[in-house]
Image: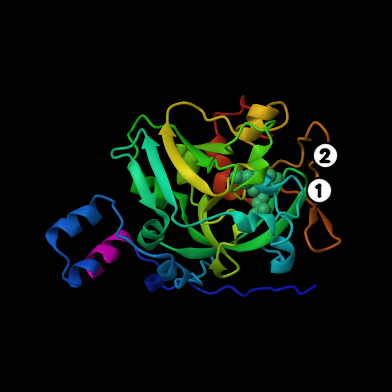
Amino acid sequence: MHIIRRRSWELPESAVTPEAAFLSRRESLGLGAGLMAMLAAGKARAASQAETDALHPYPRNAAYDPGRPVTDEKFASQYNNFYEYGTSKSIAAAAQQLVTRPWDIQIDGMVEKPGPVAIDSLIMAMPREERIYRFRCVEAWSMVVPWSGFGMKALVDYCKPLSGAKYVRMETFFDPKMAPGQRAPFYPWPYVEGVTIEEARNDLAFMVTGAYGKTLAKQYGAPIRLMLPWKYGFKSIKSIKRITFTDQRPKGLWESLQAAEYGFWANVNPEVSHPRWSQASENVLGTNNRIPTLLFNGYANEVAGLYKGLEKERLWA
Ligand SMILES: Nc1nc2c(c(=O)[nH]1)N[C@H]1C(S)=C(S)[C@@H](COP(=O)(O)O)O[C@H]1N2
Ligand SMILES: [Mo]
């Protein structure tokens, strides 16, 4: 297999678009006061998919160095969990039925101004970058992927949550005509996941709109999915349609089905076995290597602080 060992380079300041710069650039284009006020209120301007496709590749943020070879795209793109399109790993072809435009994300719950935002407008308004992350599924396989997107913190700020909001709940589309897997009545569709607002604001929490330097292929959960590299993969919900700020802890699809095996926190920990298998090691996708699993998937420095005082919680599965 081909191993791409990408070299790090610095992220140029100009590569990201902080809100202030975004506004002043628009201002210099001579936009009217009304439009300026709309932008300042966190409303994004209209944009098309052609515009957001053309933004790839996003500039790489070299601060996120996985310390492992990137998984060849041919493996990562053909071995997926996306139960909306079947329970096997070979759902890439079936997932092409997913219609990703138009795609509005409904923002609701405890926010200043609930409402929909069109995916391309959101992408245009966010500080975009590429990060290479390790990814560890609860089933004990792992991969290393260059994801393109923006920090979840930027999205939270954009949504302007009220001070009482404690959790972010996310929901995937529900459309059994477009997703045959959703005709299986056994699962409590739609797929739901959630995090605390502190987790959502952590630097590592990443909203993904691309992979391998291109617009996100459908099987990864286009047009936008979550990536929480310190948690088991099922927390990283795909094809997000609704984001709700709430004071109630969200219950994910897997927790609803099998709470004893899949909890709310689901942080990676090699010492805490899944009820049916060990989590001590993982199979690296596209290789014959089995390597030791790391606490928080190796991201303890970045996230361990989130769990101080929560030791009584079932943090690990
Ligand atoms: N909507 C939705 N999101 C989902 C899933 C799913 O079935 N449906 N599977 C989860 C699981 S178990 C994993 S391991 C990852 C897989 O992401 P990948 O296919 O991009 O590797 O997506 C997660 N997000
Ligand atoms: Mo998973």
Q: How far is disc 1 from disc 2 in space, using C-alphas?
A: 8 Å
Mark yes or no: residue 176 visible.
yes
Q: Is the residue at mark 1 in contact range of ligand 2, meaning its CB lies under 8 Å from it? A: no
Q: Is residue 124 magenta?
A: no
Q: Are marks 1 and 2 in contact (CB under 8 Å)?
A: yes
Q: In screen coordinates, is 227 left or right of 141?
A: left
Amino acid identity at mark 1: Ser
Q: Quadrant of residue 266?
A: top right
Q: In screen coordinates, is 119 left or right of 42?
A: right
Ligand 2 placement by image quarter:
top right
Give percent across and percent down for residue 104: 41, 50
| Mark 1 Cα shell of 10 Å, populated few (<14), some (14-19), many (≥20) | some
Give percent across and percent down for residue 169: 49, 36
* Above or below 179: residue 132: below
82 vs 201, nearest the viewer:
82
228 vs 239, nearest the viewer:
239
* Above or below 132: residue 276: above
Q: Is the residue at mark 2 in contact range of ligand 2, meaning its CB lies under 8 Å from it? A: no
Q: In screen coordinates, is 240 left or right of 84?
A: left
> Residue shown at 68%/61% (left/top)?
144
Q: How many marks?
A: 2
> Residue shown at 69%/62% (left/top)?
77
| Residue 278 numbered mark, or none | 2
Write the start and end of the magenta stretch as one range: 18-25
Disc 2 secondary structure class: loop
| Residue 281 numbered mark, or none | 1
Residue extending farthest to the front is 177
Give percent across and percent down for residue 187: 67, 33
